[in-house]
Image (cartoon, rainbow, N blue to C red):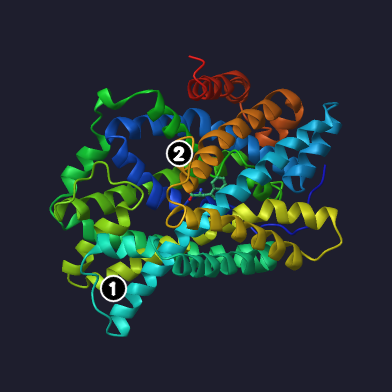
Amino acid sequence: MQTASVHGMWSSRLMFIMAATGSAVGLGNIWRFPYITSDNGGGAFVLVYLACILLVGLPILFSEIIIGRRGRMSPINSLRELARDSGASRAWMGLGWMGVIAGFLILSFYSVVAGWTLHYAWLYFKQLFLGAEAIADPGATFGALLANPGELIFWHGVFMVMTVSVVALGVEKGLERAVSILMPMLFVLLLVLLGYAMTTGHFGEAVGFLFKPDWSSVNGGMIVTAMGQAFFTLSLGMCAIMAYGAYLPSDVNIPRVGVAVAATDTSVALIAGLAIFPIAISFGIDPEGGGAGFIFTSLPLAFNEMTWGIAYGMAFFLLLSVAAWTSSISLLEPPTAYFVESSNLSRRTIALIIAALTWAMGLASVFSLNIWSEVTIGGKDIMSAIEYVAADIMLPVGGLLIAIFAGWVLSNRITRTELDENMPSWAYSTWLWITRVFTPLMILVVIGGILGVF
Ligand code: TRP
């Protein structure tokens, strides 16, 4: 059993929690969660999502950390080695490769959306310090951004440079330093916004929208979306947390850090909802059916009217950019670690090459917003199609295989030692059987639903 990774190690338990929470908390919480909740009718969707976090997300989160820490290498090589030691097929490394492809696709559109947030932070910065005009018609401003490929490509590029410059520096000097500065900043910004939302007088309505279930909106499509979101928001199913697990010191208790990460991530999504919907409602914006532009078209109206609104606006979009940044580094780390192990190139060169390829792939998402907006794949525009295939299909399939690997391929001796040797038997058996049977079945039912088997 290895005690250290060649890539470096987190210097403390808190560092892992910050890095994994940094990966988990991102556009998924603050951009995607509010708008898909809005599109899926609110309360009932939130409950299904919470159930998915608990019953599917948490067991897989533990599994990824266990596999990563036991293997101490990039996901692809950890899976290969552990499979070999367990007498299982080398083909398990294919799961690592699938993760690399899913991560590549996710980062390609993720960085385009993160580019929008950078652009908005810049718009507010200009208003605050350079005397630029307020955003008079947010819908038109957002529309104009999407219609302008040059602008989108520029910000998408800036964001990719930010991401690669952290990953190129490695675990201690790059990832750890970035999250230890950015995560505290993120929490302060989030609390400021929540504080403001509480003063709008519409907090109660937002609570009702988020937590009062309308069961008539539950259907197969909604459950697929809720589970996809559970995977996406916890960064599960593509071995990103597995890669971070490889740098986790051996004496850290996995269930405890796993629960801390999942609980923080879920709280941030709910707090973001509670910070965003009251502001939208107080400006007469219907919280339902907002679409992917929801925060970009609704919040600027509020920021125009609020005292200090421009500063809040800048704080909000800065928050979102920071959250996206600590997530995107976890999408780039697994393939980078793999090629560091299996080539003679430096980490810097490898990170640059992968980022450049991902940036180029992102152009497909950029153009799907304007010059290729007529092109559809299976009824979706290109960007939505990439998001759907990667987030709603590849992540659950990856999660299914991760659960099977941790539950059935690794020996009980290994998983028990990694989880917590002093764990009561009933607790271990509960995790084991949920991971072996329950979680895979839930995922199969949902995937079966997508494929129209049921
Ligand atoms: N969890 C991040 C978010 O909510 C996105 C993300 C980072 C991610 N790494 C991932 C999603 C790995 C899936 C897999 O914004």
Residue type at mark 2 is Gln
Residue 97 drawn at (x, y percent): 72, 42
Residue 429 drawn at (x, y percent): 62, 21
Q: What element carries label 1?
A: helix
Question: Residue 311 — which label?
Answer: 1
Q: Quadrant of residue 330?
A: bottom right
Residue 141: in sight, yes or no?
Answer: yes
Residue type at mark 1 is Ala
**In the picture shown, does residue 155 fall above or below 224?**
below
Q: In which quarter of the image is residue 77?
A: top right
Question: Residue 229 — which label?
Answer: 2
Towards the viewer: 377 or 280: 377
Residue 14 drawn at (x, y percent): 57, 55
Residue occupying the point 39% across, 60% down: 146
Q: What element carries label 2?
A: helix
Residue occupying the point 75% across, 62% down: 350
Lower position in the chain sequence, tag 2 or tag 1: 2
- Tags 2 and 1 touching, CB below 8 Å: no
Residue occupying the point 42% across, 33% down: 226
Q: In which quarter of the image is the N terminus?
A: top right
Ligand 1 under 8 Å from disc 2 Cβ: no
132 to the left or right of 166: left
318 to the left or right of 325: left
**In the picture shown, does residue 306 fall above or below 389?**
below
**In the picture shown, does residue 84 fall above or below 124?**
above
Towards the viewer: 378 or 205: 378
Which class describes the residues within 10 Å of circle 2: few (<14), some (14-19), or many (20+)? many
Residue occupying the point 71% across, 36% down: 95
Ligand 1 under 8 Å from disc 1 Cβ: no
84 to the left or right of 210: right
Residue 385 drawn at (x, y percent): 50, 41
Question: Residue 319 — which label?
Answer: none
